[in-house]
Amino acid sequence: MNAPFALPARMRVADLSQAEEVARIEAFVFGQGGSIFHRPAWLHAVEEGTGNRALGLVAERGGEIAGWLPLTEVHSAIFGRMLASSGFAVGGGALAADPMCSLELCRAAEELAVRRNCTTIELRGGLAPEGWDERTDSHCGFVCELAEDEQAQLLAIPRKQRAEVRKGLQNGLRVSIGTSEADREAHYAIYAESVRNLGTPVFPRALFDAVLDGLDADILTVSHEGRPVASVLSLHHDGAVMPYWGGGTLAARHLRANDVMYFALMNHARIRGCTHFDFGRSKTGSGAFSFKRNWGFEPQPLTYASWTAPGAAKRDADPNSDRHAARIAAWQHLPLGIANCLGPIIARGLG
């Protein structure tokens, strides 16, 4: 007997202004085990915090959602216009039980991009159609299970890195967790200084506020003698914690404040009921890549894909590309006040 024939899915642009539509998509994302970056709540937070429009394509069969492609329409005078899945995220891509439906969503995104004058589509995960540029060597993700208690968590860290954590724990550091205005101010000041030192424009603080207000997220800050020296904004989703936007001051290094910060976050996440620690992505072979391996995390290659409209130049917003090396070097020497003023204007177009 032949297998039943699956009718083609109907593709349409989602109406994310309708609460019922959003609720249906949120339920589909959770039912399919999607990431926090697949959620309409993430798209709305990005739109509120950066001004980049929340979009998405829905595939339906028989009135039921069969697939979903979250999209952010990113505008940049420097880097051009693109559709990102998802914007300001390390994950995304089409979500569907049927691989063919995922590919059909991507093809529909090509048509949407042309209609909206976007020359690029970026997928941070998921399947991509034939002819798209696909890479598995640029970034890796790092996830592991949390231990059963604090002592077991410490012992799970490889010996050399465990020694760094123990040194930090002897430095009189204080850990605080919250989402108050004081937490947000301390985090943004530290994060802004940290990314300036790396030569990267800082995101608008409005983005962090929107994520904290619209999703399950909090801030963990490490202080020394009353002065915040390291801080991280973490996302909580489906039993996992992901330290997403974090950094430290110059003093954090010799205090081992970052080491204490991540160890404290592991323990905080376990108390909250999390079972996994998602250390996020890092560029393959980078310093952050090595740092996470030192903690005992095994790198898992991530699949990213992009589409460029016929006749258009390929988008290059990679901070590690040769094209941007001089700009990064110049940015690292900007006074912090100027970097914090200009950074959000540029960063909201990075996507």
Image (cartoon, grey):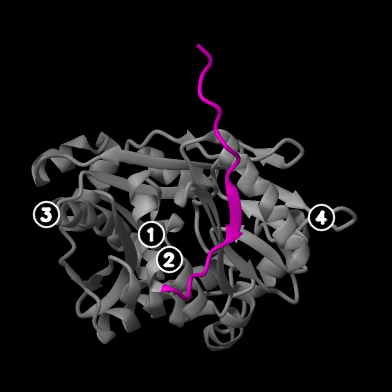
Q: Which residue is labeled 1 in the image? A: 24
Instruction: Give yes or no for residue 197 being in the magenta stretch.
Output: no
Q: Which residue is labeled 4 in the image? A: 309
Q: Which residue is labeled 3 in the image? A: 271
Spatial CA span between label 3 and label 4: 48 Å
What amino acid type is highlighted by mark number 2? Answer: Glu
User: Disc 3 vs disc 4: which is toward the camera?
Assistant: 4
Q: Are marks 4 and 2 in contact (CB under 8 Å)?
A: no
Q: Which residue is labeled 2 in the image? A: 21
What amino acid type is highlighted by mark number 4? Answer: Ala
Residue neighbourhood size for the residue with mark 1, other residues' Cα within 10 Å, grouped as few (<14), some (14–19), many (≥20): few
Question: Helix, strand, or loop for circle 2?
Answer: helix
Q: Position of residue 254 (x, y in %)?
A: 33, 61
Which region is colored magenta? 1-18
The residue that appears at 65% across and 53% down in the rendered structure is: 122
Secondary structure that dominates the magenta span: loop
Q: Position of residue 127 (x, y in %)?
A: 59, 39
The residue that appears at 28% across and 65% down in the rendered structure is: 216
Residue nearest the observer in this picture, 347 or 239 = 239
Q: Are marks 2 and 3 in contact (CB under 8 Å)?
A: no
**Label number found at residue 328:** none
Q: Residue 248 falls in which quadrant of the image?
A: bottom left
Question: Helix, strand, or loop for circle 1?
Answer: helix
Residue 157 visible in the displayed image: yes
User: Disc 4 vs disc 2: which is toward the camera?
Assistant: 2
Q: Are marks 1 and 2 in contact (CB under 8 Å)?
A: yes
The residue that appears at 34% across and 67% down in the rendered structure is: 233
